[in-house]
Image: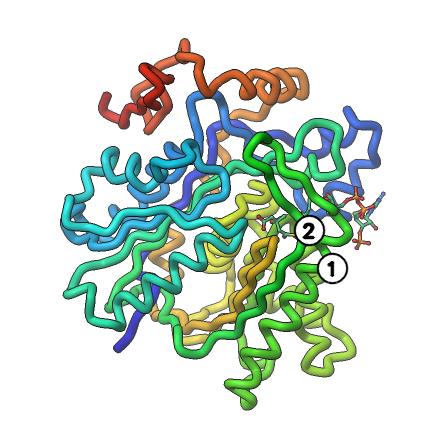
Amino acid sequence: MKVGIDALGVAVPSLCLDLEALAKARGVDPKKYLDGIGTWRMGVAPLDEDTVTLAARAASMAMKSGEASGDDIGLLVVGTETAVDHSKPVSSYVQGLLGIGQRCRVFETKHACYGGTAALMMALDWLRSGSARGRKALVVCSDIARYGLNTPGEPTQGAGAVALLVSEAPRLLELDPALTGQHATDVHDFWRPLYSKDAFVDGPYSVQCYLDAITGAYRHFREQAPWVTADDFAALAYHVPYGKMARKAHRQLRALDGDLNPDASFDAQVAASLALPAQVGNVYTGSLYLALASLLATSSRDLDGQRVGLFSYGSGSCAEFFAGSVVPGAQARVKALELQALLDAREVLTIEAYEALMAAREATDLKPLERARGDAFHFLGVEAHKRTYAGPSA
Ligand code: HMG
């Protein structure tokens, strides 16, 4: 049975920050952020956008692109590490906002940035088990990445969501769930205690944990498919907390195959997957899938029928290396989503407005909002301890 990604949708917040301006405000050489980190813009969510509204927008785009109705969905999972409630899942809000039917499994998954991949793997197994009975799965990865002002992690923030419609007739990427490599280990590289909105991170250690994880996951993958080398992939998409990390990952992966000049393959195999992430920043669970969307949307090469390798990493940690084949026509389908136009439509914040927004976000959990708009899913505020949202037509 063929299984894989049939359609995708992307949502970014309506605001963003130029990292050159942030570098200047922090007294840092802008080249450190633009070249050393490899990101030039990061998404910033206004007060009426959150993990739910981003998830709903991405899911709505994926369903429209995949011509799926609410009743076609038999499994709706949101992978997130920045949920809005300790108990009620983001997926239930998405179900309500999108009118997805009641005969559906609806829940949320968490494992740092790996939570979306956990949901995708589960969706593929659900299809292959026969439980789907012709229905599709909607896997949504949605997050707002926050480290706080004046921290080393500040230029690696971001926000966004990627939704994947997963089916037995994939029109984007056919995946092989039986051939994957995993690597899991109990580490404290990055975490966010229940009492904190900002993540805590041991930056250099987290980079090392990521590299150890790609080593373990790729070796595990290769044990099952010893005939495959990195050269067999037309493209490789990595988890992208920031662009430079993907470059480090690529060097590590190619070195495992004995490649003494791993940078030589970077432009051909990786660069296109970083075009959109470099303008959005870290979107945690959606990061790998934004890289995949970027590859399909921006690569100038014909990828029809070509193999793509994917690496997902979630701190804490769990990682997976897996692979898929690009379905003919996939690039045209993703290009039609006009993702670059979505990014270009964002308002660029001043440093003062960004800092004020970060401070105001501390209080928004209980504060009703002044602004109500009719153009997109948005957060209205909290009434009787219940978060309320409105859809585009409200
Ligand atoms: P830092 O200490 O500010 O930066 O933190 P640095 O000193 O390591 O410099 C960064 C790079 O800029 C270096 O390049 C410098 O050489 C270069 P590298 O040596 O690494 O190739 N640089 C310059 N380049 C050009 N011109 C200059 C210049 N100056 C310096 N003038 C760090 C960087 C990433 C650690 C920090 O931002 C951080 O802690 N970020 C958050 C953690 C993170 O993203 N970790 C990634 C791996 S863990 C992961 O991916 C999981 C995660 O997504 C969470 C989840 O799973 O949920 C985070």
Whether ligand 1 has any atom under 8 Å from the Cβ at mark 2 is answered as: yes
Give the residue pinned by disc 1: 208
Q: Residue furthest bottom?
A: 227
Nearest to N terminus: mark 2 or mark 1: 2
Name the spot of residue 261 as percent of width and height, x first. 77, 75
Give the residue displayed 49% in from the left and 49% down from the top. 285
- Residue 152, which numbered label? none
Asked whether the beta carbons under mark 2 and mark 1 sit within 8 Å of each other, the answer is yes
Could you classify mark 2 by the number of other residues whose Cα lies within 10 Å: few (under 14), some (14-19), or many (20 or more)? Answer: many
Give the residue displayed 31% in from the left and 22% down from the top. 388
What SS does tag 1 mark?
helix
Q: How many marks?
A: 2
390 horizontally vs 288: left or right: left
Could you classify mark 1 by the number of other residues whose Cα lies within 10 Å: few (under 14), some (14-19), or many (20 or more)? Answer: few
Residue 147 lies in quadrant: top right
Instruction: Determine if residue 8 is in view.
Output: no
Name the spot of residue 181 as percent of width and height, x first. 52, 74
366 horizontally vs 112: left or right: left
**Disc nearest the viewer among 2 and 1:** 2
377 horizontally vs 159: left or right: left
Instruction: Determine if residue 241 is in view.
Output: yes
The correct choice, above or below, for 232 with respect to 174 in the image is: below
Q: Nearer the viewer, residue 371 or 197?
A: 197
Name the spot of residue 336 as percent of width and height, x first. 35, 50
- Residue 189, which numbered label? 2
> What kind of residue is marked 1?
Gln
Q: Nearer the viewer, residue 264 or 369?
A: 369
